Amino acid sequence: MNFESTGGIIMDAQEQQLTDQEILDAIKTGKKMLFFTAGWCPDCAFIKPVMPEIEAEYDQYDWITVDRDANIKIAQKFGVMGIPSFIALEDGDEIGRFVNGDRKTRQEVEAFVDGIGK
């Protein structure tokens, strides 16, 4: 798989059945935003309906939805214990994180992304 991008690509690791290694390869270059979620998570279900709008608004990132349970090694690598959570990366290096087990609103996610690098 070729993960080179100029931004705005949206990948769902579970839907596309990406392996942990494919996710690790995908985050090596460019700006990526990992969105950790799980099907059983009510707080994830709360934010999920607005995610397409957030992803479109912040298309400088390639968004990768990561199922915390299916990709537990990725979650462990990034220290994700609570979901929903977001980790911003640039060329494989972490540049921001919004990681906890609290419900997140659209405004909170947008404030997080707006604050990266400031």
Image: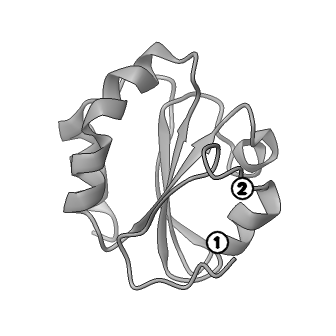
Image position of 97 with respect to 47: above or below? below
Q: Image quadrant of residue 2?
A: bottom right
Residue 107 locus on image (x, y percent): 18, 39
Outermost front residue: 16
Q: Residue at x 24, y 59 (%)?
A: 56
Q: Which residue is mark 1?
A: 26
Residue found at x 57% / y 23%: 39
Verify CB contact (< 8 Å) between mark 1 and mark 2.
yes
Is 66 left, or right, of 44 in this rendering?
A: right
Position of residue 86 measured from the top left corner of the image (x, y, whole percent): 47, 47
Q: Quadrant of the N terminus?
A: bottom right
Tell me the quarter of the image containing the C terminus.
bottom left
Mark 2, residue position: 18
Against 14, residue 8 (above or below) is: below
Count of residue discs: 2
User: What's the residue type where badge 1 is placed?
Assistant: Ala
Secondary structure under badge 2? loop
Residue located at (29% from left, 68% from top): 59
Cα–Cα gap, marks 1 and 2: 10 Å
Q: Residue at x 62, y 75 (%)?
A: 92
Depth check, front residue: 97 or 2: 2
Tell me which amino acid carries mark 2. Leu
Q: Earlier in the sequence, mark 1 or mark 2?
A: 2
User: 68 or 4: which is nearer to us?
Assistant: 4
